[in-house]
Amino acid sequence: MSAASQARPPTLEDVARVAGVSRATVSRVINTTRNVDPAIQETVRRAIAKTGYTPNTAARSLVTRRTGTIALVVSGAGDFGGDILVDPFFGRVTSGLINALRPLGVYPLLMFADTHESRAHVVDHLRQGNADGAVVVAIHSQDPLPAMLVAAGVPAVLFARPTKPLSISYVDLAHRDGARLAVDHLVGRGCRRVTTISGPLDVPASQERLAGFQDAWADHGHPAAPYVEGNFTQDSGEKAMEHLLAEHPDLDGVFAANDLMAAGALHVLRDHGRRVPDDVAVIGFDDSSAATASRPALTTVRQPVEDMAAEMSRLLLDRIGRHDGRVTSVVFEPTLVIRHSA
Amino acid sequence: MSAASQARPPTLEDVARVAGVSRATVSRVINTTRNVDPAIQETVRRAIAKTGYTPNTAARSLVTRRTGTIALVVSGAGDFGGDILVDPFFGRVTSGLINALRPLGVYPLLMFADTHESRAHVVDHLRQGNADGAVVVAIHSQDPLPAMLVAAGVPAVLFARPTKPLSISYVDLAHRDGARLAVDHLVGRGCRRVTTISGPLDVPASQERLAGFQDAWADHGHPAAPYVEGNFTQDSGEKAMEHLLAEHPDLDGVFAANDLMAAGALHVLRDHGRRVPDDVAVIGFDDSSAATASRPALTTVRQPVEDMAAEMSRLLLDRIGRHDGRVTSVVFEPTLVIRHSA
DNA sequence: GAGCCATTGGAGAGCGCTCTCCAACCAAGA
DNA sequence: TCTTGGTTGGAGAGCGCTCTCCAATGGCTC
């Protein structure tokens, strides 16, 4: 029932005065940093409640050199017109991170970076101590941001392995295994003329999914399957599907490197009168909301994005806690989620 | 080309020493707070570049009582299982805000609140000075968070008008006008048996859209149109459409209170062999990514969400800048975007 | 040439907190 | 009784910055 509107907010000093102890003791109670007599603890707690005291983050950060905040940096999403959050995949990363952080009482600072200038600005902001570290999602493999962060000494964890070896922690997915899951399922259904829509091939994940697909397909005794490169948008999936259908009208299976492109393929297949999965089986990748939203619902290779995001926060917090700059990485295994499209 | 990895980062003091001036002068140059001799300015700038100096945010905040950060608080998204970001509508709010803030060099702190406990935590976090103010998106009308923020003296701007009068700034949309746009278009196409899928009726925006719809429909000389209540998810749109179709098999028009529900309606209509727009015309609301992603692409009432988000940041920054607690509000007008579904 | 005001630089206090010392105290062993 | 060692509270420095004063300077006017 405190008013606390106009007046200066209460400080440690105020609490100490009310409790009749020193500032140091109050600080000890708040931070449980050393033994304090239980009776005194109680007095202090009461004084805190009475004054409505709240620690001043800035003052604390100034001495501890910690903010208790971490940044979520999305780099290179310019092509997505700033709508990257709407992409069901990144949405999952973000919510996964938020949910992992919430129990710890830490909230992420959301930063986007596309241009050279904005990347520099992000690094500056981080160096200024606005966050203790960063969880980074870099869309393109040549993104310079990870290297810049390492150089600036900012603790960071990447989503996906960096192209060039870098002293940085990351989480990743066994993309090849995922592609193999898809191929095996397609083959199991009896598909014989399979095609694939890859992601942009400058992205390692896309390369891996394509390579995994071709390898697995070859393992089943087939020659290399036709593919068209997309860019992870639904629109590119539609275009790719049109193309594949024109070149290979007899195709009976499609593996798309993400769900959005698979959804686009579904539209096109229907427009051409192909029944899914009877005429053509379609498998997506990610298990994003697009997979359940499309008709028929997509059979897809699930990426445990939320778990991966949670692991990122864990790795980052570890890295910040320890002061040696040791880095760790974790690779997750995909699973196949069978719905109606294959 | 600075190394700056292990050693303590340079401080104002260091820069002052290198430049041969006082700390105060360097501060003046950085903050352009008073006239400083151009020659000295140049010297100082050089010293800053040489030392690789970066202001320490915590120290600055401690004295200015400003962080230069604002929070984006999403309250009551629990029903969405933390996937709220994936909702194309909230994604747009977020990107709109980020893009508006970016040129100013401010990055938002992302905070979710569902439970009473988490709301209290959010308010605490804000009171501790982790942000100068908050942009708030509250899903439910009875959400106590806005009132809590006002009570705590945290500057805030709401998306959508608060149910109870509250001394708080907000942006909103003229929902009734939007519904009218949809009705007029439907009538213009010759629809005579129109139905609507409303949003959850505890949300003021849903009430307004429904009321606007019924009013406009009545203005065209029709009796009240049938409606079913949804909850803004695609799934609820499907269920609602099934229901409407069962009760009113002769319907020739549907107005859904958001695009996701309209997309769900589209699926169901197709499953029932109805051609859109020939047999049934469908209009959505929002003009989110779901509108362009569905087949046929949705004719929809566009909400200028990005502009609204930008306006929110402007209102908030104003409110923080001025010290009187004056509040302002802005109501935006919707437009109709005609695609293929109606 | 004396006096005045506007302009610009420096000194230093202080923002609210943590944390290192140091002092006080108490219990146990000799 | 004195010493020793462990426990707990207080004093005070200092984190890096801003901002209020005050002093110095220089160009005027009369």
Image (cartoon, coloured by chain):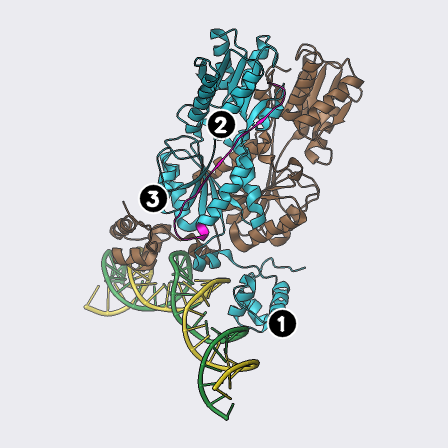
Chain colours: A cyan, B brown, C yellow, D green
Residue A151 bears which disc, if any? 3
| Residue nearest the viewer, comparing A118 with A299 | A299
Residues rendered magenta in the picture: A320-342
Tell me if B90 is positioned left or right of A147 in this view: right
Tag 1 residue: A39
| Label 1 or label 2, whichever comes before in sequence order | 1
- Residue A141 percent coordinates (x, y): 39, 31
| Residue nearest the viewer, comparing A115 with A167 | A167
Residue type at mark 2 is Asp
The chain holding disc 1 is: A
- Residue B67 percent coordinates (x, y): 48, 51
**Element type at mark 3:** helix
User: What is the quadrant of the N terminus of chain A in the image?
Assistant: bottom right
Density class for disc 1 (Cα within 10 Å; few <14, some 14-19, many ≥20) is: few
- Residue A250 percent coordinates (x, y): 52, 6
Tag 2 residue: A177
**Element type at mark 2:** helix
Q: CA distance from mark 1 to mark 2?
A: 60 Å
Density class for disc 3 (Cα within 10 Å; few <14, some 14-19, many ≥20) is: some
Q: Is residue B312 visible?
A: no
Q: CA distance from mark 3 to mark 1?
A: 49 Å
The chain holding disc 3 is: A
